[in-house]
Image (tube, rainbow, N blue to C red):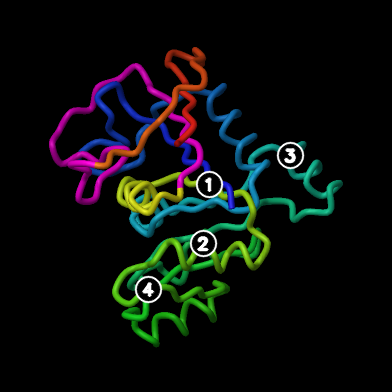
Amino acid sequence: MHVVVNAAASVDGKLSTRRREQVKISGADDLARVDRVRADSDAVLVGVGTVLADDPHLTLDGDDYRDERRTAGRDPSPARVVADSRARTPTDARILDDAATTYLLASEAAPAERLSALREAGAEIVVAGRTRVSFPDALAELESRGVERLMVEGGGEVIFSLFEDGLVDELTLYVGSVVFGGCDAPTLADGDGFVESFPRLELRDVERIDDGVLLGYDVR
């Protein structure tokens, strides 16, 4: 599986403010680029924190991209994936509608009644890991179901875990011309943080988009 992390951050590396609310960082041109990346992917992954904060839909915005996928014999939108160790996703979340397949990655510690309710709401449940999602196992299961290219849109703890497990192949980071500040504001890679054996990135390209910069990295 090829894993692409795509994110937008402030100049000081924050994904949002300390309130962890959805904040506009990029402009129309970058949002169109993100839709292109989604269209090229088999699935799009977010953490449950993103679902609880933003209630995203994670489907394609452009009709042309949906038509392009249909012509290629693919579903109109890529599958949606939620990393949710304890099965906290609301059963009325937009990500559970019938616009695309939705996989929910849970751990063995998730309450059985919550998994049953989410399955009833339309999620395909993938259990991997004892107390938290094991991404190596979960991604292997997704790959067995046809997910060969996975786009990861956050949040910071999910991105950190994927880097920690050595699963990231590419990182595209849009840096907007804004400063959020705040030691409690989410960053690109939260979690425990690295103190040694840091992920090695190789800068591939730099492009100005809207009033910001898009950085493209290969992960070695």
Q: Earlier in the sequence, mark 3 or mark 2?
A: 3
Q: Earlier in the sequence, mark 4 or mark 2?
A: 4
- Which image quarter is the C terminus in? top left
Highlighted magenta segment, given as a residue range:
168-196
Residue displayed at 32% across by 47% down: 160
- Residue in the foreground of this view, choosing between 89 and 84: 84
CA gap, disc 4 and disc 3: 35 Å
Q: Are marks 3 and 2 in contact (CB under 8 Å)?
A: no
Please name the amino acid that badge 1 sits on.
Answer: Val
Q: Is 4 on the left or on the right of 176, as rendered? A: right
> In this figure, which residue is indicated by the disc labeled 3?
65
CA gap, disc 2 and disc 1: 10 Å
The x, y position of residue 75, in whole percent, is: 74, 56
CA gap, disc 1 and disc 3: 20 Å
Which of the two discs, 3 and 2, sits closer to the camera? 2
Query: Which dot marks residue 139?
Result: 2
Look at the numbered disc 4 and give the secondary structure of its residue: loop
Q: Is 41 on the left or on the right of 178, as rendered? A: right
Look at the numbered disc 3 and give the secondary structure of its residue: helix
Q: Are marks 4 and 3 in contact (CB under 8 Å)?
A: no
